Image: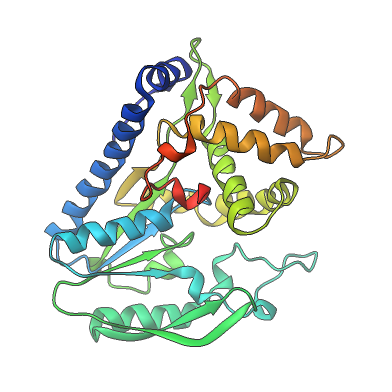
Amino acid sequence: MINTKYTLSSINKAASNDYESFVRTSEDLYTKTLSDLTEKIIENHENKIVMVAGPSASGKTTSATKLAKLIYNRGVNAYTISLDDFYMDRNEVPKFPNGKPNFETVYALDLPLLSKNLNQLIKEKESELPVFDFHNGCRSKETNIIRLEKDDIVIVEGLHALNPVITDCLPHENLLKVYISIASRIFDDNDNVFLTKRNMRFLRRAVRDHQFRNSSIENTYKLWESVQFGENEYLFPFKPLADITVDSFHSYEPCIFKTIAAELFQELHPESEYYSDCEKILLTLDKFKAIPIDTVPRDSLLREFIG
């Protein structure tokens, strides 16, 4: 992972000089990061299963899809599996003490079925996987059959992909563990953190919820509390287990989210308990130079959030 220190002034300078070049450079950097990861995956054919974990709005789903395409371009087939398809039916999910369902815990997944399917793929090269119906909150009657040929790769992505509850049931010599998230912060000219990693993930999540889930900013704030609890409890403790870490931050993204967030956050009522935090984020984003949304490439990771 390339460690770069991003500042408000450097981002605005790049956005002012030639924002199209700025966007291309940022996109090329992330493509190179995934290309380097592809090389590591392919050079060791024992790594039949690539476990890709990351917190909410890290871009792990799009990154897994991009990885599969890059692997395919190298002449190797790659299949993606989402851990979300292994959710138990909504009425069977473990509950918090207050009675609300805990969708963040690893035990909300059908762990015996997950272990069975992944081990079948490793040992028997074929398995029939579930498909979850999120509209009805239960497992679909449809299934997904995967048959592996020699050297084929499986990419498993999800919040819990690094959790030993899952990985300890699999042969370690067949695994490559990858952690993807926003790992960069943005600093001001006084070397103070100007925009945090969680700020940026929240922006991604809020925009995506509004675009694809018809969710208000108020509702995203309410969900964000349980999301952070789940990450602290079930993801971050296992980050050190990753073989490779990937920074999914795109240096121009605050310039894109500036305009979208300004419109979206207006929906929040001034009496909301989240209004003060919302104002702080908007004041921060206001310092960035805006970049037209149509500049974002159609295959960019950011399209996972902005549509």
Q: Position of residue 49 (x, y in %)?
A: 28, 68
Q: Which residue: 64% across, 30% down?
A: 281
Instruction: Identify whether 79 is placed above or below 304.
Output: below
Q: Position of residue 179 (x, y in %)?
A: 38, 51
Residue 1: in sight, yes or no?
Answer: no
Residue 243: in sight, yes or no?
Answer: yes
Q: Which residue: 55% across, 22% down?
A: 194
Give the quarter of the image for residue 166.
bottom left
Which residue occupies the foreground of this view, 198 or 232? Answer: 198
Instruction: Identify whether 177 is placed above or below 28.
Output: below
Which residue is the extreme one toward the top? 190
Give the quarter of the image for residue 62.
bottom left
Q: Is residue 147 left or right of residue 105?
A: left
Q: Position of residue 257 (x, y in %)?
A: 54, 36
Which residue is the extreme one toward the bottom? 141
What quarter of the picture does the N terminus occupy?
top left
Instruction: Identify whether 300 is placed above or below 188.
Output: below
Q: Position of residue 269 (x, y in %)?
A: 83, 39
Q: How many marks?
A: 0
Q: Which residue: 66% across, 72% down?
A: 94
Which residue occupies the foreground of this view, 201 or 135? Answer: 135
Which residue occupies the foreground of this view, 93 or 268? Answer: 268
Q: Which residue: 63% across, 74% down?
A: 135
Look at the image and name its color scheme.
rainbow
Give the quarter of the image for residue 68.
bottom left
